[in-house]
């Protein structure tokens, strides 16, 4: 394998600044202890943890890329675009993310109203306790509330019975456009990456093809191939897709919490040697 492929890079995880449960500092320590060489914190629609993450990585002598995960609406579905190597103080991306976050509070109230109708009171306040900020409140925070109340045994069960389409507590939301998200990332000097493409099962093959082509046309450069959200079969599938469309390949655990997450920070297979790692864009 090439030396670039052997880098233990984890370029997708979340802290308490969005919907993770660990501080940026604790995440940095966990990444380092798990052998991560190159790390990125990619909180949802928020850059507030970036300086802390960079400082913590620096103190641990771990290479760092500033990151973010932007919520995007594409063909009526929510997809996520990761930005890597961005300037976390760039006015354009900060303003774009602020606008993207604004809708979360109203959506959360509507989600709580729906849960009340099925006999679950106090969901907004309960979710806000986990979020700490109404601009960052998300389905994950509602899920943790439902587990805390004993309504579901874990967050996986929550997302089978609540907060998803046709179930109580589901409220769709229009996020940023794909074009805007990629433009913000590029303007901030970063590389745009389609996060966990295997999760977008509601898009058919033709729609996925259109997504990949349009993303490339507007300057998107990479897709996640090795991620905690993919099965080993999907590693192969999206490795082939990266080659087919000429994308760089990214790798990230999508770590949120020691108990909830499928894969720990850095505990991922290496990228296949025939793919070009996204971090080659920064070397």
Image (cartoon, grey):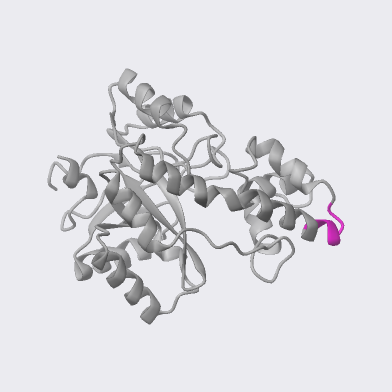
**Residue 7 placement, left or right of 98:** left
Residue 244 visible in this rendered orientation of the protein: yes
**Residue 7 placement, left or right of 183:** left
Rendering coords of residue 151 (x, y %): 78, 51
**Residue 243 placement, left or right of 131:** left
Among the 4 quarters of the image, the one containing residue 57: top left
Residue 119 among magenta residues: yes
* Residue at (19, 65) in percent of width and height: 246
Q: Nearer the viewer, residue 5 or 187?
A: 187
Rendering coords of residue 188 (x, y %): 30, 43
Rendering coords of residue 167 (x, y %): 71, 67
* Residue at (24, 57) in percent of width and height: 221
Residue found at the far bottom of this picture? 206
Residue 44 visible in this rendered orientation of the protein: no
Q: Which residues are magenta?
A: 115-120
Q: How many marks?
A: 0
Rendering coords of residue 153 (x, y %): 72, 50
Quarter of the image for the C terminus: give it.
Answer: top left
Q: Nearer the viewer, residue 108 or 25?
A: 108
**199 vs 269: above or below:** below
């Amino acid at each position: 394998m090439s030396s670039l492929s052997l880098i233990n890079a984890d370029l997708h995880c979340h802290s308490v600044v969005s919907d993770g449960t660990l501080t940026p500092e604790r995440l940095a320590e966990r990444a380092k202890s798990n052998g991560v060489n190159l790390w990125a914190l990619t909180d949802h629609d928020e850059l507030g943890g970036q300086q802390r993450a960079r400082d913590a990585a620096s103190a641990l002598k771990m290479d760092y890329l500033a990151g973010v995960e932007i919520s995007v609406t594409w063909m009526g579905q929510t997809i996520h675009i990761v930005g890597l190597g961005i300037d976390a103080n760039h006015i354009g991306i900060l303003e774009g993310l602020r606008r993207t976050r604004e809708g979360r509070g109203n959506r959360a109230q509507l989600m709580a109203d729906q849960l009340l109708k099925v006999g679950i009171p106090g969901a907004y306040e309960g979710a806000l306790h986990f979020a700490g900020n109404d601009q960052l409140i998300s389905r994950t925070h509602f899920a943790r509330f439902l587990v805390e109340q004993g309504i579901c045994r874990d967050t996986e069960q929550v997302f089978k019975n609540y907060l998803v389409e046709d179930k109580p507590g589901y409220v769709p939301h229009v996020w940023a456009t794909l074009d805007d998200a990629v433009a913000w990332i590029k303007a901030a000097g970063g590389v745009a990456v389609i996060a966990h493409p295997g999760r977008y099962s509601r898009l058919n093959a033709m729609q996925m093809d259109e997504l990949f082509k349009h993303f490339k046309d507007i300057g998107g450069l990479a897709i996640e191939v090795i991620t905690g959200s993919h099965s080993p079969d999907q590693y192969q599938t999206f490795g082939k897709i990266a080659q087919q469309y000429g994308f760089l390949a990214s790798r990230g655990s999508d770590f949120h919490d020691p108990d909830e997450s499928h894969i720990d920070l850095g505990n991922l297979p290496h990228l296949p040697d025939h793919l070009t790692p996204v971090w080659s864009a920064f070397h």
